[in-house]
Image: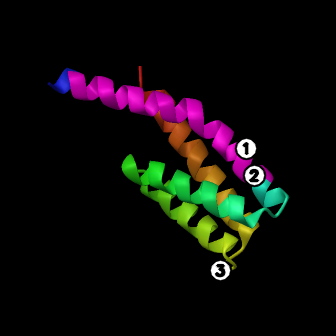
Amino acid sequence: MQTEKSAFLGRLFEVFLQDEPARMEALATAVNTRDLKQVAYLAHSLKGAAATMAMERLRDACRGLEFAAKGEGNLGAWLAAVLREADLVFATIRDNIP
């Protein structure tokens, strides 16, 4: 059972590493073009993925970016926080998933 769980989690993290860099790029583009609807959508979906995998700091940064897209904060500062936390998550996953 533990091996199955480990394999499942490993696959989940692999998919995250494959898919999320493209979402980060799309998020940065949306912020740079001031496409606030797209920023809110992408931040919300990334927030859900991060919450599912207990990536709390990334989840919180995504929440801040989502609110900033709705006029409640500094978009650039929150994007920087999301990108910084995502980089830390990516590095941690790469260092710990065989």
The secondary structure type at the circle numbered 1 is helix
Locate residue 64, reporting x and y percent. Answer: 58, 69
Figure check: 6 above or below 73: above
The secondary structure type at the circle numbered 2 is helix
Q: Would residue 26 be counted in the magenta stretch?
A: yes
Quick check: marks 1 and 2 in contact, CB under 8 Å?
yes
Question: Which residue corresponds to mark 3?
Answer: 72
Q: Amino acid at mark 2?
A: Ala
Depth order, front residue of 15/61: 15
State which quadrant residue 19 falls in.
Answer: top right
| Residue range (magenta) | 4-29
Q: Locate the C terminus and report the quarter of the image it occupies.
A: top left
Q: Amino acid at mark 3?
A: Glu
Q: Locate the N terminus and report the quarter of the image it occupies.
A: top left
Q: Would residue 9 be counted in the magenta stretch?
A: yes
Figure check: 78 above or below 53: below
Dot placed on the residue nearer the N-terminal end, 3 or 1: 1
Q: Residue at x 17, y 26 (%)?
A: 2
What residue occupies the far right of the structure in this picture? 33
Locate residue 74, reporting x and y percent. Answer: 72, 73
Q: Kindly identify which numbered label has been placed on residue 25.
A: 1
State which quadrant residue 22 falls in.
Answer: top right
Q: Kindly identify which numbered label has been placed on residue 28.
A: 2
Q: Amino acid at mark 1?
A: Glu
